[in-house]
Image (tube, grey):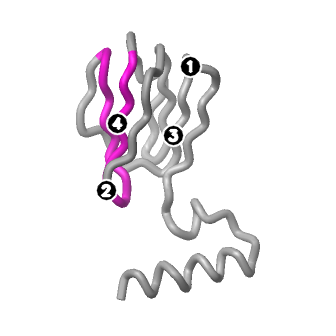
Amino acid sequence: MEKRREIISKAMADFLEIPKDLVLDLPKLTVIGRDELYIENHRGIIEYSVNKLRINLSRGYLEIEGENLEIKALMPEEMSILGRVRAIKYYD
């Protein structure tokens, strides 16, 4: 049933030309060089250290590995991260 709803939502987003991240509650990442990362549509922090950051998503989580990672700004559904980003991994 969930897959069916996702397919219908995706089709509606395409038809109405609405961004999929809004309709399907997908994360949106903006990477600026290797030193700044902006995440929208997150669901909170799972783990935080200067070398690893795990962010909860509506489906799965996101893992960011790097050096001197620092959360610059944290809002209910948005966050800005500074530091040397080495890897960004998605997990379901």
> Which labelled disc corresponds to residue 75?
none
Crowd rating for badge 1 (residues with CA inside 10 Å; few <14, some 14–19, many 20+): few
1 versus 14 height, above or below = below
Which quarter of the image is occupied by the C terminus? bottom left
Q: Position of residue 83 (x, y in %)?
A: 47, 15
- Please state which amino acid type lies under the numbered disc 1: Arg
* Mark 4 / mark 2, whichever is N-terminal: 4
Mark 1: secondary structure? loop
Per the model, the C-alpha gap separating discs 4 and 1 is: 15 Å
Q: Is residue 29 left or right of residue 48?
A: right
Name the residue rendered at 46%, 39% in the picture: 75
Per the model, the C-alpha gap separating discs 4 and 2 is: 11 Å
10 versus 90 height, above or below = below
74 versus 2 height, above or below = above
Extent of the magenta region: 50-66
* Mark 4 / mark 3, whichever is N-terminal: 3
> Which labelled disc corresponds to residue 92?
2
> Which labelled disc corresponds to residue 34?
1
Q: Are marks 4 and 3 in contact (CB under 8 Å)?
A: no
Q: Give the prevailing secondary structure in the magenta stretch.
A: strand
> Which labelled disc corresponds to residue 63?
4
Where residue 11 sits, quadrant-wise, is bottom right
Which quarter of the image is occupied by the N terminus? bottom left
Per the model, the C-alpha gap separating discs 1 and 3 is: 14 Å
Per the model, the C-alpha gap separating discs 2 and 1 is: 24 Å
> Which labelled disc corresponds to residue 39?
3
